[in-house]
Image: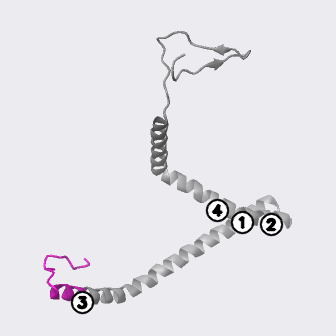
Amino acid sequence: MYPGHRQLIGEEGEAISNNNESIKTAQVTPTLLLIIGFAGLIIIFQGMRFGAALINTFLLSAIITITIYPAMGWLREKGAPKVLAFIITIFIALTVVALLIFVIAFSIDQFAQVVPTYEKSITSFQKTAKEQLDAIGVNTSKWSWSWS
């Protein structure tokens, strides 16, 4: 036997060895295992990146299911038929989603109304910063200060 050669054990417990010297066994070093492990991680992460839309959809549906399922079970415990419990649960879930969409749309509308106030404040700060930088000798003439 030579270094790196592994002995196989047969059915009766006897050692099975390869006597053919032309066949070499590959040694797996810790460095090689580390490189293969990192390559595997890179492949997994790239696969997750390319399949992000599918993975995110699956995870979102799992979260929604895990969140809604107890309500359906509660309705079933109270004696509601399976189909009715399902319809009521889906209706409640869709109502919650519609409310979330309404709240987000309302928030965006409110933010759009407040933006001019922020714009004035930022423009004032920008002007003060430019004056202070010019006062200490920083050339700001080539800088773009516009928001458009």
What whole-number distance in Å separates the C-alpha atoms at marks 3 and 4?
A: 49 Å
Spot occupied by residue 72 in the image (x, y as percentages of width and height): 76, 63
Of circles 1 and 3, the one toward us is: 3
Which mark's residue is nearer the viewer, 2 or 3?
3
Q: Is residue 131 magenta?
A: yes
Q: Is residue 13 magenta?
A: no
Identify the magenta region.
129-148
How far from the left and from the top, in percent, is residue 21? Answer: 49, 11
The residue pinned by badge 2 equals 75
Quarter of the N terminus within the rendering = top right
The residue that appears at 40% across and 86% down in the rendered structure is: 113
Q: Is residue 65 above or below residue 114?
A: above
Label number found at residue 64: 4
Residue in the foreground of this view, choosing between 89 and 33: 33
Instruction: Please report contact status of discs 2 and 1: CB closer than 8 Å, yes or no.
Output: yes
Disc on the earlier residue, 4 or 2: 4
The residue carrying pointer 2 sits among few (fewer than 14), some (14 to 19) or many (20 or more) residues within 10 Å by Cα, namely some
Q: Residue at x 53, y 56 (%)?
A: 56
- Comes first in the chain, label 2 or label 3: 2
Q: Nearer the viewer, residue 73 or 146?
A: 146
First in residue order: circle 1 vs circle 3: 1
Circle 4 crowding by C-alpha within 10 Å: few under 14, some 14–19, many from 20: few
Of the pair 18 and 87, the residue shown nearer to us: 18
Task: Give percent across and percent down for residue 106.
Answer: 50, 81
Q: Is residue 34 left or right of residue 145?
A: right
Q: Secondary structure at mark 3?
A: helix
Decide: is 50 above or below 83. above
What's the amino acid at mark 3?
Answer: Thr
Of the image marks 4 and 1, the number of the one nearer the N terminus: 4
